[in-house]
Image (cartoon, rainbow, N blue to C red):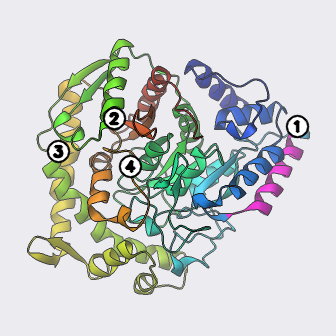
Amino acid sequence: MRALRFLAASAAIFLAGGCAATSQRPADITQLGVADAARLIRDKTVGSAELTQALIARADANTDLNAFITLDRAGAMAAARQADADLAAGKLRGPLHGVPLVIKDNIHVAGLPSSAGTPALRGFVPKRSAPTAQKLIDAGAIVLGKTNMHELAFGISGYNEATFSAQPIGVRNPYDRTRFAGGSSSGTGAAIAARIAPGGLGSDTGGSSRIPSALTGGAGFRPTIGRYDNAGVAPISHTRDTVGPMARTVADVALLDAVITGGKVPAPASLKGVKLGVYRAYFFNNLDADTGNVMNAALDKLAKAGATIVEVGMPELQKLNNAASFPVALYEAYDDMKAYLDKHQTGKTVEELAAMIASQDVKGTYNGLVVPRKLPTPEGLIDAAPVYETAIKQARPALIQHYADTFAAYGIDALIFPTTPHVAVVQGPDASKLETFLLFIQNTDPGSNAGVPGLSIPAGLGPATGLPVGIEIDGPRGSDERLLAIGMAIETVLGPTPAPK
């Protein structure tokens, strides 16, 4: 009964959200989203094995995207055939029965390698799935495979010199294969955009689920910190890390979130009465022409649809975020990785892992900062411990309060801004440069450090480049369901982003 209620709820939000639910078999079943695939499999209009086979064939035809580290052809097909057999016998496992999904390679799936995109962990095969992945599996989902990522999740380009299925190196954007797909959840974003999977899981420390979603025309969610159980995920920072669901629509992301939390799928909000805050002095800096054009058009459409756009001030944002961001992530990275390697009996030390890192940008970060416990300053390297203590005890609490004060003072439901200042740039070694990293995390990083929920929504294609642009809404802590409900309403107004050609 619980599974049937979930399916009914997912159908309701899809219809109410303005996305035409598919009731008939589409000509190309690889175009199905999560909720539609679940519905058609349940109705026996499409078989799980049939859909899984079609998606595997699509993956095999697109190896140049470098989207996968492990494509589990045999395992996925066996699970799909079992899903069809169970359904024929009247057994419905849950709201995701028979739906193929992908999982980022730093999130454990029992029986599949979990390398976190780094050579030292290539042979590590966990015996238990991460709780977030297990929730999806328990709801009937099938794992197609483990997706490629920026090595150890320490970057946003997906230029991983250790993991690629075809030359040239680097996860590629399905909208333009000369460009990157963002990161660090690069492969999940690319697979969803290329219609290799309807949805899946990424992780997010400073934007790693939202950035690739924005750059590949999808929706990506960072929940309030602590909303999901983060066990079974190769870490950077326990203060900042979270798993993040990704799909082509907010409605599908909301369904994945409800499965993970065991909560309800919210109905789309009415935009009338919704107040969206705009802080131009920070979030609208460094925009390229396409991002600026799409963002301004989106704000106009939302205002006409009934939303109130409120200009806000957050004068302490940049200073507080700078004080809380890298000191926390870089300091916690050593201890958290050591604890992870020991707990899961990988047989590796942090130093051994660092010695085998393949990507030059990540190797420099680990050897120069993480392992020696240092932080960079204009005067040179300094010990990280005292800076971390100040960040965790003073700067981060102050940043959290700054967000809370802003939401309260202006009476806004969410902040709204471009997820990334630019559309996707050219893939290659230069995509991993520090200046590119800092540009692409500019808007996603502050909310990550404040622990607030953030949702990237597809907003369309740039008029000059034809590349996807995402807009983000960040809400108060604990407002996850309300944020998803607003996001579903926004995507209805903005309309779907066209699929890559």
Amino acid bearing label 3: Leu
Residue occupying the point 32% across, 81% down:
367
Q: Residues within 10 Å of mark 2 (few under 14, many from 20)?
A: many
Element class at badge 2: loop
Numbered badge on residue 90: 1
For the N terminus, which image quadrant? top right
Kindly report which numbered mark, 2 or 1, lies closer to the viewer in this rendering.
Answer: 2
**For the residue carrying disc 1, how many other residues have a C-alpha within 10 Å: few (<14), some (14-19), or many (20+)?**
few
Q: Which element carries disc 3, helix, strand or loop?
A: helix
**Mark 4 surroundings: few (<14), some (14-19) or many (≥20) residues within 10 A:** many
Q: Position of residue 303 (x, y in %)?
A: 33, 16
Picture quarter containing residue 330?
bottom left
- The residue that mark 4 highlights is 225
Along the viewing direction, whichever of 46 and 96 lies nearer the viewer = 46
- Residue 335 appears anywhere in the view: no
- Which mark, residue 475? 2
The local crowd at label 3, few if under 14, some if 14 to 19, many if 20 or more residues have their Cα within 10 Å, is some
Q: Earlier in the sequence, mark 4 or mark 3?
A: 4
- Which residue position is annotated with label 3? 317
Residue at disc 4, secondary structure: loop
**At which x and y percent is residue 19?**
59, 23
Quadrant of the rendered image containing residue 239: bottom left
Which of the two marks, 4 or 3, is nearer to us in this view?
3
Q: Is residue 296 shown above or below 166?
A: above
Q: Is residue 72 above or below residue 493?
A: below
Amino acid identity at mark 1: Gly
Image side of residue 154 versus residue 400, left or right: right
Pointer 1 or 4: first along the chain: 1
